[in-house]
Amino acid sequence: MESFHSSDAWAHPRVPMASSSVSADIASRNRGRMARPPDPHLVWTLRSRWGINEGVAQVLNPNSASPRRLRNRLRDATRRAILEAAEDVYSRWGIGAGKIEEVAARAGVSVGTVYNYFADRRTLATSLVETRRAELLNRVDAALACCDSFESRLRAFLDAVLQHFARHRKFFAILVHGESGRHGAGPLAGSAGPSATLHELTRRARAIVDLGQALGRLRDEDPGFLAAVLVGAVRAVLLRSLTERGEPELEGLRERLECMFLRGAGG
């Protein structure tokens, strides 16, 4: 029998092993914590809208050891779902009248989850506008990056703006009506609103105009004025299309805008 005073015993003490019944009890409790079911409405939303169907339960579980990138993906998808729902609600009722409760129901999350992402109704509304603005400008920039000639850049600019408008037509209408006072802007009062978007579009249009003038395709006119004319014409056409029934024919709109601008500003 090993001596209690053995140097090996002191250097490498033996740790008592838990009994099989104790180990089974611990494993059972751990399985119970790991198997807590996620919110079924959120899971349905993420699967149907965003295609997140692998490891959703793990990601939703606070004790999960899933990779951080999956948790980030979940947060991004939840935020997008809330913003999509907010756009639907605001398009139907207006920004001032849309309720957080309906946004939550359409997104498939609890009201508390909405407030976890957006502090209040104003924050949600302004975040939606800023997100859509960023999407539009990213779409425009990506389209322009693929073009070299003046004509192709002008065409790409018009296509990108029209395509974004077609996708978010109802929400665009709410913003426009808010500008004119027909709908209470409510949470957007005092914010940058659509004017910031027009400023950024005009800045990008100015670069196209500068290229056109350098190549002799446009007349020697104030480039800032020509850029404002281009963006103003696009905005006017989009506003007109809001009063018409049915979806606008984007290809036809783009061709008419391009032709009008080149004829009016051509060198």
Image (cartoon, rainbow, N blue to C red):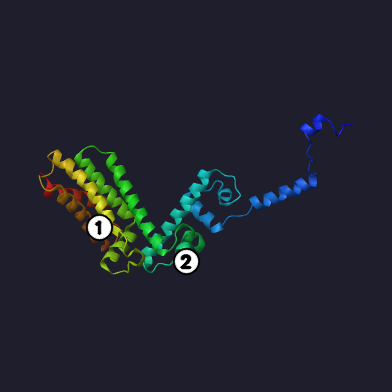
Quadrant including the N terminus: top right
Give the camera-side residue of 53 and 74.
Answer: 74
Amino acid bearing label 2: Glu
Q: Is residue 137 left or right of residue 55?
A: left
Name the spot of residue 221 as percent of width and height, x first: 10, 47
Q: Is residue 261 left or right of residue 67?
A: left
Local packing at callout 1 (Cα closer than 10 Å; few below 14, some 14-19, many 20+) is many
In the current view of this chain or complex, which residue is farthest to the right? Answer: 1
| One can see residue 108 in this view | no
Q: In 3D space, how far apart are the residues under numbered discs 1 and 2 (Cα atoms)?
A: 31 Å
Look at 20% across and 46% down and name the residue there: 206
| One can see residue 40 in this view | yes
- Mark 2 residue element: helix
Give the camera-side residue of 68 and 157.
Answer: 68
Mark 1 or 2, which is nearer the eye? 2
Name the spot of residue 257 as percent of width and height, x first: 19, 51
Q: Is residue 123 left or right of residue 207?
A: right
Look at 47% across and 61% down and name the residue there: 115
Residue 10 against residue 92 in the figure, above or below = above
Look at 20% across and 55% down and name the residue there: 232
Tag 1 residue = 238
Residues at discs 1 and 2 in contact (Cβ within 8 Å)? no
- Mark 1 residue element: helix
Residue 154: give its label: none
